[in-house]
Image (tube, rainbow, N blue to C red):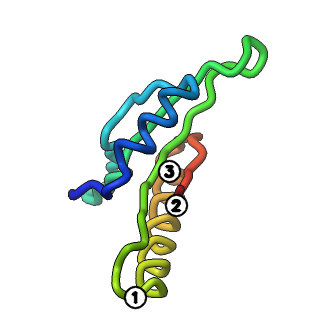
Amino acid sequence: MAKDSVHYIVQEALINDGWTITADPLVLKRDKSKLEIDFAAEKLITAERGIEKIAVEVKTFVQHSIIHAFHEALGQYLNYLTALKLIGDDRTLFLP
């Protein structure tokens, strides 16, 4: 799967904010289906809250039709959100 042009910029911003990249890409498998979210990251917030986990799907919206790009990104987001819930993954999904 091709990475968006800002993929590594988003990763670097998260790393600079104290996040650790734990998967690139984050592969979700269920039955015969396989989805790939751009990457996963974790960050120790406080001893009381523990580790916060996120999944990040990067989009740039540089296609000819911004409406088509939006619908495509929204569809991916909803598919990934559903897949995370189905496999019991408690990550927060972001679409920066």
Q: Earlier in the sequence, mark 1 or mark 2?
A: 1
Q: Earlier in the sequence, mark 3 or mark 1?
A: 1
Residue behind mark 3: 84
As measured in the structure, the alpha-carbon distance from the residue carrying label 1 to the one carrying label 2 is 26 Å
Q: Quadrant of the N terminus?
A: bottom left
Please tell me whether mark 1 sits on a helix, a strand or a loop. Answer: loop
Q: What crowding class fits label 2: few (fewer than 14 Cα within 10 Å), some (14-19), or many (20 or more)? A: few
Please tell me whether mark 2 sits on a helix, a strand or a loop. Answer: helix
Asked whether, in this view, residue 26 is left or right of residue 55, the answer is left
- Amino acid under label 3? Leu
- Amino acid under label 2? Thr
Please tell me whether mark 3 sits on a helix, a strand or a loop. Answer: helix
Q: Position of residue 6 (x, y in %)?
A: 37, 52
Mark in the foreground, 3 or 1 = 1
Asked whether, in this view, residue 93 is left or right of residue 39, the answer is right
Mark seen at residue 65: 1
Mark seen at residue 19: none
Residue behind mark 2: 82
From the viewer's perspective, is residue 74 above or below residue 3? below
Residue contact between numbered discs 3 and 1, judged by CB atoms under 8 Å: no
